[in-house]
């Protein structure tokens, strides 16, 4: 039977003080009880740790060996206890985080930095994926969490809002909408709008198109769902083309020569 850690702490206190009286006062226990606990430790180890007489206390060779290694042993045990508690509370380990390209401009870096500051024992492994792939990765347990803009509900995935952004319209600096202090949906609906395909993010696509539909501003979005092809198709038409409907925070972090955000 191995001795209790408590007995080792009692011994170290006596070894440091070389006095049962001072050690007992330091440990807030009665001196007779401390003496009994030290005898119990010696009995369990089968070795004398302390030489006692009426006036002095000294360490035996066994006592010196235990005193030299005892503090490190207690520190190692304390580290093991702390590691077990932190792991049980989810404060250590690995977090596999998948996020979309747009979330990588601001939201993901802020969340990862905050997590590192608060829980430095958690390692974060990140991967950039399209929104549908993020949902599948979580369903397949290839990712523990994901960050996506307006994802559609998916079986086995819990959705939680972590940030809200105002939507805006990115246009060329010489576009008519660029002169407006506010841009309404009605004004936007008078121009072609480039938006990502629905397959790229069904939830976000439905959010954008639904804003127009609920105000009776229906349109054929199938011909406007690819910014690159739309720009090529409109290059021969009169007037500068608008750009995708995206959140201003994201758009403001992109380099876009000749573009500006109308005031929201």
Image (cartoon, helix red, strand yellow):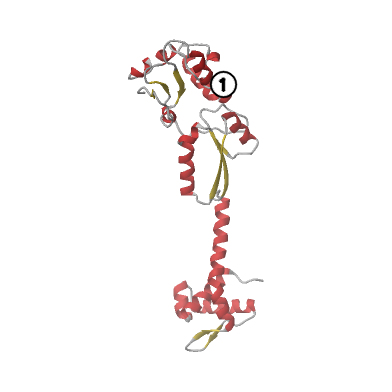
Which residue shows up at 57% across the image and 60% down it?
A: 80
Number of labels in the image equals 1
Residue 215, visible in the rendered structure: yes
- Most extreme residue toward the bottom is 54
- Most extreme residue toward the right is 1
Residue 220 is situated, as x and y percent measured from the top left of the image, at 53, 11
Which residue shows up at 47% across the image and 40% down it?
A: 109
Q: Quadrant of residue 2?
A: bottom right
User: Callout 1 environment at 10 Å: few (<14), some (14 to 19), or many (20+)?
Assistant: some
Residue 134 is situated, as x and y percent measured from the top left of the image, at 59, 33
Q: Quadrant of the C terminus?
A: top left
Circle 1 sits on which residue? Answer: 198
Residue 37, visible in the rendered structure: no
Q: Quadrant of the N terminus?
A: bottom right
Residue 247 is situated, as x and y percent measured from the top left of the image, at 44, 27
Which residue shows up at 59% across the image and 81% down it?
A: 62
| 132 in relation to 79, above or below | above
- Callout 1: SS: helix
| 87 in relation to 250, above or below | below
Residue 92 is situated, as x and y percent measured from the top left of the image, at 55, 51
- Most extreme residue toward the front is 236
């Amino acid at each position: 039977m191995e001795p209790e850690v408590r007995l080792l702490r009692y011994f170290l206190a006596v070894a440091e003080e070389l006095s049962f009286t001072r050690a007992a006062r330091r440990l807030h226990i009665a001196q007779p009880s401390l003496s009994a606990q030290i005898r119990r430790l010696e009995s369990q180890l089968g070795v004398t740790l302390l030489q006692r007489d009426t006036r002095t206390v000294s360490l035996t060779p066994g006592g010196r060996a235990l005193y030299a290694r005892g503090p490190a042993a207690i520190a190692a045990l304390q580290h093991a206890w702390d590691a077990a508690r932190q792991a049980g509370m989810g404060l250590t380990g690995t977090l596999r985080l998948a996020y979309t390209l747009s979330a990588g401009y601001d939201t993901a870096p802020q969340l990862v930095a905050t997590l590192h500051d608060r829980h430095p024992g958690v390692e974060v492994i990140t991967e950039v994926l399209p929104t549908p792939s993020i949902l599948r990765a979580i369903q397949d347990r290839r990712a523990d969490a994901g960050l996506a803009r307006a994802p559609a509900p998916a079986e086995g995935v819990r959705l939680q809002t972590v940030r809200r952004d105002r939507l805006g319209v990115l246009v060329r600096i010489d576009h008519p909408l660029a002169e407006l202090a506010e841009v309404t949906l009605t004004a936007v609906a008078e121009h072609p709008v480039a938006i990502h395909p629905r397959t790229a993010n069904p939830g976000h696509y439905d959010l954008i198109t639904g804003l127009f539909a609920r105000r009776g501003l229906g349109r054929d979005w199938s011909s406007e769902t690819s910014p690159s092809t739309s720009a090529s198709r409109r290059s021969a038409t009169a007037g500068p083309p608008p750009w995708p409907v995206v959140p201003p925070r994201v758009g403001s972090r992109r380099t876009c020569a000749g573009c500006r955000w109308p005031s929201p």
